Amino acid sequence: MNMERTSTIKRDDGLWLLERMRLVRQTSQRIAKLYPTNVMETPVHLCIGQEAVAAGVCRHLGAVDKLFLGHRTHGPALCKGLPLEKLMAELYGRTTGCSHAFGGSMHLIDVEHGLPGSSAIVGGSIALGTGAALAAQMTGQPFVGVSWFGDAATNAGVFYESMNFAALRRLPVLFVCEDNGWSNVMPKSAHSAHDITSVAAQFMPTSCADGTDVLSVYDLAGAALRSIRAGEGPRFLHCKTKRWMKHQGPDACDLPDNGIDRERDCPIRKLEAFLAKAGLAQANEFSALEARIEKQIDAAIRFAETSPFPSTDLLEV
Ligand SMILES: Cc1ncc(C[n+]2csc(CCOP(=O)(O)OP(=O)(O)O)c2C)c(N)n1
């Protein structure tokens, strides 16, 4: 565990990052627990272990910024501001869900919080963030587009086309590669012949964060977004992280080469250790936060369970 981390982060920011990562972690754990009971009407791609990427980037985004996600949506959507009860109701297939039960886990929409849509097509988010950035530039509106994708998406042609276009037009877009090293059961060495950061660096400035360390992601995402907002064109943020779960569903990853040490690699433990050592927070605050979030999750589940299923009249236009 990296307890020697230095950072000038303020208490407010540190606690926000911790609260969001805990919200994502505990929500994911609850989903994993409930999923086998068949209450959820959707596949789920959980991001336990990957919470630092979502929290570290989203701390620098406002509601006006437009974030486009792929299939592993829950973490970044919650960190961007999607209300928990709307996520839970969507997973339960209820009309009060963020996509009115028509989307499910992979198609979350919350326009108010800058989540215009997510795509289950690998690479599908990349051109969308780029297009939003083009719209911002053409209309003079002060928002950034964010394209969020996994390492496997960098094999798709749209990755190159989007980076090329964004660089040519100096678009206000941040490309975030949440690199967990796997495409379903395929390791990166079996699906990619290229080095991701080197390829992106041919088009724009890049930075590479430790995606298991939220302070690393927070620092580098902040720097990238400051330069995008200053009109300096697109930036690429590569976050190397670890997937603790199977590609899809509620079970832990059992791939032989996926060496996870849940003590060493846990972004929440790392941040708690840092905050305590820096005197920014104390252990009793951590347990109180954990308990508060459990209650929030209980309330969100009650909301989902008591919400109506869609009826066929909703299909009529
Ligand atoms: C164009 C396309 N090809 C294949 C799939 C099937 N598929 C769904 S997720 C996935 C793996 C994606 O890996 P990555 O982009 O690295 O994201 P991760 O699941 O690791 O978060 C694949 C191959 C798909 N959805 N779309």
Image (spheres, grey):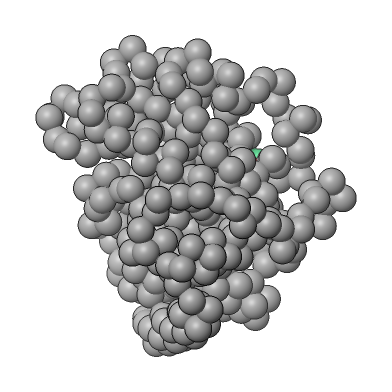
Q: Position of residue 246 (x, y in %)?
A: 72, 57
Of 316 and 132, nearer the camera is 132
143 with respect to 221 (left or right) = left
Q: Position of residue 310 (x, y in %)?
A: 37, 73
Residue in view at x 46 percent, y 50 percent? 7
Asked if one can make out residue 41 in the rendered structure from this viewpoint, the answer is no
Q: Position of residue 95 (x, y in %)?
A: 35, 72
Residue in view at x 40 percent, y 50 percent? 8
- The answer to whether residue 108 is above or below residue 92 is above
Picture quadrant of residue 80? bottom left
277 with respect to 310 (left or right) = right
- The answer to whether residue 74 is above or below residue 162 is below
54 with respect to 3 (left or right) = left
Q: Position of residue 62 (x, y in %)?
A: 26, 50
Residue in view at x 55 percent, y 73 percent? 26
Asked if one can make out residue 240 in the rendered structure from this viewpoint, the answer is yes
Residue in view at x 30 percent, y 69 percent? 313
The quadrant the N terminus occupies is: bottom right
Ligand 1 found in image quarter: top right
Of 223 and 169, nearer the camera is 223
